[in-house]
Amino acid sequence: MPSRPDRRTERTAALAVLLLLAACGGGKRPPALATTPGGEASPTGERPVQPVDEGPDLRAMEGERATGSDLSDWPASFSGEGGPLDDIRFDYDSAALTDAARAALEKHALWLQGHREARVSVEGHCDERGTVEYNLALGEQRARAARDYLASLGVAADRLRTVSFGKERPLDPGTGEESWARNRRAHFAVSR
Protein backbone atom coordinates (compact mmCIF):
# COMPACT_ATOMS: atom_id res chain seq x y z
CA MET A 1 0.00 0.00 0.00
CA PRO A 2 1.47 3.41 -0.96
CA SER A 3 2.25 5.66 1.97
CA ARG A 4 0.47 9.00 2.37
CA PRO A 5 2.68 12.13 2.83
CA ASP A 6 2.57 13.58 6.32
CA ARG A 7 0.94 16.95 7.09
CA ARG A 8 4.30 18.72 7.43
CA THR A 9 5.21 17.80 3.85
CA GLU A 10 1.78 18.95 2.61
CA ARG A 11 2.09 22.28 4.44
CA THR A 12 5.62 22.83 3.12
CA ALA A 13 4.48 22.15 -0.45
CA ALA A 14 1.48 24.49 -0.07
CA LEU A 15 3.69 27.22 1.37
CA ALA A 16 6.17 26.82 -1.49
CA VAL A 17 3.36 27.17 -4.05
CA LEU A 18 2.00 30.30 -2.31
CA LEU A 19 5.46 31.89 -2.18
CA LEU A 20 6.00 31.12 -5.85
CA LEU A 21 2.67 32.71 -6.78
CA ALA A 22 3.43 35.78 -4.66
CA ALA A 23 6.83 36.16 -6.30
CA CYS A 24 5.21 36.14 -9.74
CA GLY A 25 3.06 39.08 -8.71
CA GLY A 26 0.11 38.13 -10.86
CA GLY A 27 -0.16 41.73 -12.13
CA LYS A 28 0.70 43.29 -15.45
CA ARG A 29 4.19 44.53 -15.93
CA PRO A 30 4.35 48.27 -16.50
CA PRO A 31 5.17 49.25 -20.07
CA ALA A 32 8.83 49.71 -20.88
CA LEU A 33 9.94 53.33 -20.79
CA ALA A 34 12.59 53.15 -23.46
CA THR A 35 12.90 50.42 -26.06
CA THR A 36 14.03 50.07 -29.60
CA PRO A 37 11.26 49.79 -32.20
CA GLY A 38 11.70 46.01 -32.21
CA GLY A 39 12.17 45.84 -28.45
CA GLU A 40 15.67 44.36 -28.80
CA ALA A 41 18.01 44.42 -25.83
CA SER A 42 21.60 45.55 -26.07
CA PRO A 43 24.47 43.01 -25.78
CA THR A 44 24.80 43.93 -22.09
CA GLY A 45 21.16 42.97 -21.53
CA GLU A 46 19.96 46.55 -21.09
CA ARG A 47 17.58 48.21 -23.45
CA PRO A 48 18.99 51.23 -25.28
CA VAL A 49 17.63 54.61 -24.25
CA GLN A 50 15.45 56.47 -26.71
CA PRO A 51 15.55 60.27 -26.91
CA VAL A 52 12.80 61.97 -24.90
CA ASP A 53 10.73 64.93 -26.04
CA GLU A 54 11.12 67.31 -23.11
CA GLY A 55 8.31 69.51 -21.93
CA PRO A 56 7.13 71.32 -18.81
CA ASP A 57 6.28 68.01 -17.12
CA LEU A 58 9.10 65.81 -18.47
CA ARG A 59 12.87 66.13 -18.62
CA ALA A 60 15.47 63.74 -20.01
CA MET A 61 17.69 62.03 -17.47
CA GLU A 62 21.24 61.68 -18.69
CA GLY A 63 23.59 59.19 -17.08
CA GLU A 64 21.31 58.54 -14.14
CA ARG A 65 18.63 56.04 -13.31
CA ALA A 66 15.13 57.10 -12.32
CA THR A 67 15.21 56.00 -8.69
CA GLY A 68 13.03 58.63 -7.09
CA SER A 69 16.00 59.94 -5.11
CA ASP A 70 15.40 63.41 -6.49
CA LEU A 71 12.17 63.53 -4.47
CA SER A 72 14.20 64.04 -1.30
CA ASP A 73 14.65 67.72 -2.22
CA TRP A 74 10.92 68.22 -2.65
CA PRO A 75 8.53 69.57 -0.09
CA ALA A 76 6.31 66.85 1.37
CA SER A 77 3.55 67.84 -1.05
CA PHE A 78 3.02 69.78 -4.27
CA SER A 79 -0.61 70.73 -3.91
CA GLY A 80 -0.64 74.11 -5.66
CA GLU A 81 0.04 75.21 -9.19
CA GLY A 82 3.55 74.76 -10.51
CA GLY A 83 3.90 71.11 -9.46
CA PRO A 84 5.65 68.58 -11.68
CA LEU A 85 2.42 67.45 -13.43
CA ASP A 86 0.33 69.89 -15.46
CA ASP A 87 -3.44 70.05 -15.18
CA ILE A 88 -5.58 68.52 -17.91
CA ARG A 89 -8.71 70.22 -19.23
CA PHE A 90 -12.22 68.95 -19.92
CA ASP A 91 -15.01 70.10 -22.19
CA TYR A 92 -18.16 71.63 -20.72
CA ASP A 93 -20.35 69.13 -18.84
CA SER A 94 -18.01 66.25 -19.71
CA ALA A 95 -15.65 63.83 -17.99
CA ALA A 96 -14.38 62.37 -21.28
CA LEU A 97 -10.64 62.68 -21.85
CA THR A 98 -9.69 64.76 -24.86
CA ASP A 99 -6.77 63.83 -27.12
CA ALA A 100 -4.71 66.59 -25.50
CA ALA A 101 -5.55 65.23 -22.03
CA ARG A 102 -4.51 61.70 -23.04
CA ALA A 103 -1.21 62.99 -24.42
CA ALA A 104 -0.52 64.88 -21.18
CA LEU A 105 -1.44 61.83 -19.08
CA GLU A 106 0.96 59.67 -21.11
CA LYS A 107 3.78 62.08 -20.21
CA HIS A 108 2.60 62.07 -16.59
CA ALA A 109 2.75 58.26 -16.56
CA LEU A 110 6.35 58.33 -17.81
CA TRP A 111 7.27 60.85 -15.11
CA LEU A 112 5.55 58.79 -12.41
CA GLN A 113 7.30 55.61 -13.53
CA GLY A 114 10.61 57.44 -13.11
CA HIS A 115 9.62 58.74 -9.66
CA ARG A 116 8.31 55.64 -7.95
CA GLU A 117 8.07 57.15 -4.47
CA ALA A 118 5.70 59.86 -5.68
CA ARG A 119 2.02 59.60 -4.77
CA VAL A 120 -0.66 61.59 -6.57
CA SER A 121 -4.00 62.95 -5.50
CA VAL A 122 -6.02 63.50 -8.66
CA GLU A 123 -8.38 66.41 -8.01
CA GLY A 124 -11.49 66.92 -10.11
CA HIS A 125 -12.63 70.53 -10.63
CA CYS A 126 -15.56 72.19 -12.42
CA ASP A 127 -16.64 75.65 -13.45
CA GLU A 128 -19.16 77.67 -11.45
CA ARG A 129 -22.25 76.64 -13.42
CA GLY A 130 -24.54 73.99 -11.96
CA THR A 131 -25.36 72.93 -8.41
CA VAL A 132 -22.80 72.04 -5.77
CA GLU A 133 -23.94 68.38 -5.80
CA TYR A 134 -23.84 68.12 -9.59
CA ASN A 135 -20.34 69.59 -9.78
CA LEU A 136 -19.02 67.37 -6.98
CA ALA A 137 -20.23 64.32 -8.92
CA LEU A 138 -18.78 65.63 -12.21
CA GLY A 139 -15.47 66.47 -10.52
CA GLU A 140 -15.30 62.91 -9.18
CA GLN A 141 -15.93 61.51 -12.67
CA ARG A 142 -13.14 63.69 -14.07
CA ALA A 143 -10.68 62.64 -11.37
CA ARG A 144 -11.52 58.96 -11.89
CA ALA A 145 -11.15 59.24 -15.67
CA ALA A 146 -7.62 60.65 -15.23
CA ARG A 147 -6.72 58.09 -12.54
CA ASP A 148 -8.02 55.17 -14.58
CA TYR A 149 -6.08 56.26 -17.66
CA LEU A 150 -2.86 56.59 -15.64
CA ALA A 151 -3.45 53.13 -14.18
CA SER A 152 -4.01 51.71 -17.69
CA LEU A 153 -0.58 53.12 -18.60
CA GLY A 154 1.12 51.15 -15.82
CA VAL A 155 1.04 53.52 -12.84
CA ALA A 156 0.23 51.49 -9.72
CA ALA A 157 -3.32 52.22 -8.58
CA ASP A 158 -2.22 52.33 -4.93
CA ARG A 159 -0.17 55.45 -5.75
CA LEU A 160 -3.24 57.30 -7.05
CA ARG A 161 -6.23 58.63 -5.13
CA THR A 162 -9.09 60.82 -6.27
CA VAL A 163 -10.93 63.73 -4.71
CA SER A 164 -13.55 66.09 -6.10
CA PHE A 165 -13.70 69.78 -5.29
CA GLY A 166 -16.51 70.48 -7.74
CA LYS A 167 -16.78 74.23 -8.20
CA GLU A 168 -15.46 75.07 -4.71
CA ARG A 169 -11.81 75.81 -5.65
CA PRO A 170 -11.72 77.68 -8.95
CA LEU A 171 -8.34 78.32 -10.51
CA ASP A 172 -9.73 81.43 -12.18
CA PRO A 173 -12.36 83.34 -10.15
CA GLY A 174 -13.61 85.23 -13.20
CA THR A 175 -16.76 84.58 -15.21
CA GLY A 176 -17.10 83.85 -18.88
CA GLU A 177 -15.97 81.00 -21.12
CA GLU A 178 -12.19 81.65 -20.75
CA SER A 179 -12.36 81.45 -16.96
CA TRP A 180 -14.75 78.51 -16.99
CA ALA A 181 -12.50 76.57 -19.40
CA ARG A 182 -9.51 76.99 -17.03
CA ASN A 183 -11.60 75.71 -14.12
CA ARG A 184 -12.78 72.51 -15.87
CA ARG A 185 -9.74 70.44 -15.02
CA ALA A 186 -8.05 67.62 -13.19
CA HIS A 187 -5.19 68.80 -10.99
CA PHE A 188 -2.38 66.51 -9.79
CA ALA A 189 -1.13 67.09 -6.24
CA VAL A 190 2.12 65.14 -5.89
CA SER A 191 3.47 63.99 -2.52
CA ARG A 192 5.97 61.49 -1.16
Image: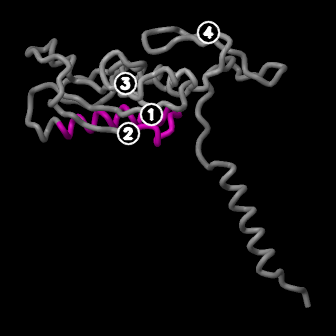
Query: Which of the 4 image quarters holds residue 131?
Result: top left
Q: Is mark 3 on a helix, strand or loop?
A: strand
Residue positioned 12% across, 18% down in the render: 173
- Do the residues bearing badges 3 and 2 touch, measured as CB atoms within 8 Å? no
What range is drawn magenta here?
136-161
Residue positioned 74% across, 73% down in the render: 11
Q: Which amino acid does label 3 sit on?
A: Phe
Q: Which of marks 3 and 2 is in front?
A: 3
Across and down, in percent, residue 22 comes to 66, 54
Q: What element carries label 1?
A: strand
Decide whether residue 145 is among the magenta residues.
yes
Q: What residue type is labelled 2?
A: Arg
Q: Which amino acid does label 1 sit on?
A: Arg
Q: Nearer the viewer, mark 1 or mark 2?
A: 1
Q: What distance separates the C-alpha of mark 4 from that of mark 1?
A: 26 Å
Query: Which residue, given by chain and number where applicable, does mark 4 sit on?
Result: 51
Query: Which residue, given by chain and number where applicable, does mark 1 sit on?
Result: 119
Q: Nearer the viewer, residue 102 or 16?
A: 16
Q: Which amino acid does label 4 sit on?
A: Pro
Q: What distance separates the C-alpha of mark 4 from that of mark 2?
A: 31 Å
Query: Which of the 4 image quarters holds residue 41?
Result: top right
Query: Which residue, given by chain and number where applicable, does mark 2 sit on?
Result: 161
Q: What distance separates the C-alpha of mark 3 from that of mark 1?
A: 10 Å
Query: Which of the 4 image quarters holds residue 57?
Result: top left
Q: Is mark 2 on a helix, strand or loop?
A: strand
Of the residues under marks 4 and 2, which one precedes in the sequence? 4
Across and down, in percent, residue 40 comes to 75, 22
Q: Nearer the viewer, mark 4 or mark 1?
A: 1
Q: What distance separates the C-alpha of mark 3 from that of mark 2?
A: 15 Å
